[in-house]
Image: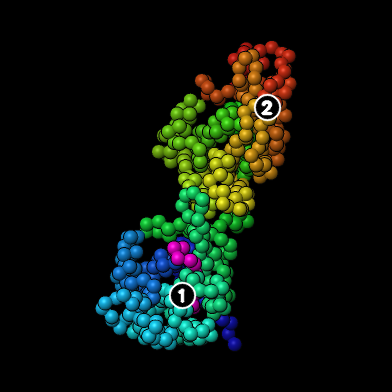
Amino acid sequence: MPEPHPAEKIRTGIPEFDMILRGGFPRERLHLLEGAPGTGKTTIALQFLLHGRRDGRRGLYVTLSETTTELRTSAANHGWSLDGIGLFELVPLEARLDRQQSVLYPSEVELGETMRLITERIEADDPELVVIDSLSELRLLAQDQLAYRRQILALKQFLHGRRCTALVLDDLTGPNGVRELHSLMHSVVSLEQIERSYGAARRRLRIAKMRGAEYQSGWHDFAITPGNVLIFPSLIAGEHQPDFDPGTVSSGLPALDELLGGGLTRGTTTMLLGPSGAGKSSVALQYVGAAMERGERAAVFSFDETFETLVQRSAALGVDVADAVESGRLGWERPNPSRLSPGEFVWQVRRQVEELGARVVVIDSLNSYLAAMPEETALILQMHELLTYLNNQGVVTVLILAQQGIVGNVQNPIDLSFMSDTVVLLRFFEADGEVRKAISVVKKRTGVHELSIREFRLFPEGMQVGPRLMDFRGVLTGVPSFDGSRDALLGGRNEAG
């Protein structure tokens, strides 16, 4: 007996959805798309039929929950036309005055009659792709669960005999989660909409089952925009194996490179840690400018700073951000915290790396990233997966984490240093009646670094990193003791850059 071949797959018209499905829905099978009202079932189903139309496949949309006018209006809102797709309206609307044969009254007709009308229309149109919206209406017509299951099983066999690929929708309004039909389906896709305490709701989906076919498990965020369904597959860092030269990159400041033992290593993550205003974003911008000087693309994801503020600050450091963005050497994005999902953020980063070739990525800041999605429970795990992916891609990643407090007892809002290969600590300290800044490296996995503490300053001559603060004690406390000469400080006779 010959070996059975894997079922051919039908693409959905949503590239990232096809990626999760590993090519699309298996052909000539019955697939279930389930989710509460408003999760996006109809929009995904319409995309499925529209893509089939572009490929020359006949499609039929059987609606028991909306009128054809409502369907056409929904499609028009996305800029789509349903011309060329069969629409069969079978809606129980008792208030209709013009009672046509296509109008079904559940109090008058049994489930079997409804199924007969559906199968007759399918025989008449002879479609390759069928959408039935929704099973909840059929469930209401059934006298009992056994009769309902038998009718759906009969429908499944009928569609298979017609060589149809069918997508049936269910809004989960029945009892007990209405999962009694999962065993009859070849595939089950579950959709969810999660309401936030503030901002836009978050949508996500998962493949609950797919018989005899590979797919990407887990939850995947998605968004519906005019004309598009944007799905953001969850990141699997292990699928992206390292293939790069693990060299070091310079900041463009010899003294800062010395502090870091020669520079930052490609394929590593560096965390800049310190209180607000200590210069973390400016240090990150120094690496961005150095990357562009080398002819490499950089990307900055700024949750906190506007583009106008960044342009002003970068000019003082000798980096023309506006020109770099316009010329394509720098990617700058400001994620909207009230509308962002973790999956969308990961996809934005991946686009900068895979499509646009970014070799330095700055995330400013982790505080805002975590605060933007307080309802999420796995943000740290997702960030860890993202950083592993960036390391595998050979990217130099710079994370910024603001500590609570200014001087003295400065505390971390959350300990994320374990995710970083290098940790750079920035502090304020008082000396000679002035508030100054200090920088030190407390961790570097990929090599030896200086154990010293150096002073640095940002303006007005741009970033400067001074010599070791040999004559100070307790700099990291913010109020050090000083038993040397003022020449050890920047502005004295022994400056270093």
In which quarter of the view is residue 251 placed? top right
Q: Position of residue 166 (x, y in %)?
A: 45, 76
Q: Position of residue 412 (x, y in %)?
A: 65, 37
Which residue position holds label 1? 136
- Left or right side of 31 for 476: right
85 is higher (above) or lower (below) than 310: below
489 is higher (above) or lower (below) than 149: above
Residue, x 50% and y 40% (percent of image)? 302
- First to last magenta residue range: 26-40
Circle 2 residues within 10 Å: few <14, some 14–19, many ≥20: some
Three-letter code, disc 2: Gly
Q: Is residue 35 magenta?
A: yes
Which residue position holds label 2? 408
- Left or right side of 422 for 197: left
Circle count = 2
CB under 8 Å between callouts 1 and 2? no
Three-letter code, disc 1: Ser
83 is higher (above) or lower (below) than 497: below
| Distance from Cα at disc 1 to Cα at disc 2 | 62 Å
Using the rendered image of the protein, determine whether residue 301 is visible from the camera's viewpoint. yes
Residue, x 54% and y 31% (percent of image)? 282
Element under disc 1: helix
Q: Is residue 98 magenta?
A: no
102 is higher (above) or lower (below) than 253: below
Query: Between residues 479 and 318, which one lies in front from this camera angle?
Result: 479
In which quarter of the view is residue 42 placed? bottom left
Using the rendered image of the protein, determine whether residue 8 is visible from the camera's viewpoint. no
